[in-house]
Amino acid sequence: MAYRRVDRRSVEVRNVAARSKTAGAKAGARKSQGRRKSLAPGKISRGLDAADIALPIDDERIAALAAQVRERGGAPIGAYREPLSGSTVLVAALPLASVQPTPFQRDLSPTHTKRLAQKIDESGSFLDPIIVVRGEDGEFCTPNGRHRLAAAKVLGLKQITALISPDEGLAFRILALNTEKAHNLKDRSLEVIRMARALARREPRAKESDYAAHFESPEFLTLGVLYAKDGRFAGGAYGSFLRKVDRFSDRTLAVSLREREGLAARLRDIDTLVRKIVKSLEARGFKSPYLRTFVVARINPVRFHRTKPGDKKPPMPIAAALTRMTAAAKGFDVAKVRSTDLALVAALSSE
């Protein structure tokens, strides 16, 4: 029995470490961001007027590029002058075989490509044109569309839409524009819950499960309710728990959203208990950025249950899991927490 207990503790600690790996860095980043000044909007004085933007495809500045597109089996669609710099851009459809990624991009991720292709297929639209320039050999290449190009090949598309620039040097400047902040858990959850509420008003008879592809994962809905009421809620600590027990409902969106309001309220009450436990641990001398996730892992009733993506049946209903989690939080004994537990968490996180 002793060996089994040690093994379970090891698994638990590793789960906590995996979820908490960047907690300290994120906390520091939030403090730093709080001191930054917000960007003020600029005066509306730069760039072209609307009448100066559109170009005919036979314009001499773009005619040669349009001819090259036709030679490769593509089709020019339109042309315009870029609103900021005034440089010419050709909008065109290109055969996939006529475009290659530049060699200095990040390596292709098969997982990301497969996921991107799946989401494009589910949406039924390929709306994001790739940027294309002419390489040194005169061939078309994309400096920032490797994954979209690969996803189009997975989908079996004949053509892909592109914004083609005659400026070959753009290939070396375009990567500097890849500064957009990726969706974090809070951003994604808020986006999903807002979408769900809008759909509930527009499609009152639609089921929540009908929009599974739109919402991506059910825990985003539950967390979205929480983030909408408290933007500082520590949703990441409960991600593993919710992924195992939260599922899309076959009830209408309006009904399911009311149910999620209740589930979110119960989870918020649990978090209140967790914060009290954390304060008690801090009072006993524990100082670690992993205290909250450590406590949540210890009271998680499904932490040792293994689930696979797409499992329709959870290891236990979410309502029952919340009941057990509440009981575990109320019965949490801070005296049984050892300093070596948190030390191991910190060591694994550092690795």
Image: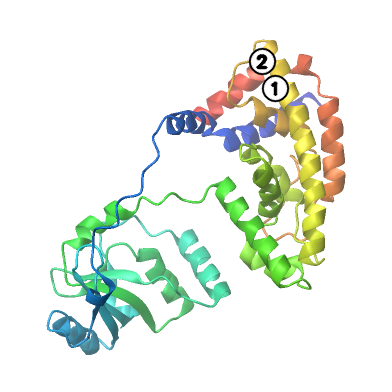
Q: Which mark is residue 238?
A: none
Mark 2–mark 1 contact, CB under 8 Å? Answer: yes
Reply above or below: 225 against 159.
Answer: above
Residue 338 in view (yes/no): no
- The residue at 78%/63% (across/down) is 254
Q: In the rendered image, which quarter is residue 256 located in? A: bottom right
- The residue at 78%/50% (across/down) is 261
Q: Position of residue 316 (x, y in %)?
A: 84, 49
Q: Position of residue 11 (x, y in %)?
A: 68, 34
Q: Position of residue 276 (x, y in %)?
A: 75, 23
SS for callout 2 = helix
Q: Which mark is residue 282?
A: 2
Residue 138 in view (yes/no): yes
- The residue at 56%/49% (across/down) is 187
Q: Which mark is residue 278?
A: 1
Viewed as shown, does residue 250 lie left or right of 94? right
How was the colour assigned to the protein in this rendering?
Answer: rainbow
Reply above or below: 242 against 159.
Answer: above
Q: Quadrant of the N terminus?
A: top right
How crowded pointer 1 is (Cα within 10 Å; few <14, some 14-19, many 20+) is rated as many
Viewed as shown, does residue 62 lie left or right of 178? left
Q: Nearer the viewer, residue 204 or 322?
A: 204
CA gap, disc 2 and disc 1: 6 Å
Amino acid type at image mark 1: Val
Q: Nearer the viewer, residue 15 or 74?
A: 74
- The residue at 58%/33% (across/down) is 20
Amino acid type at image mark 2: Glu
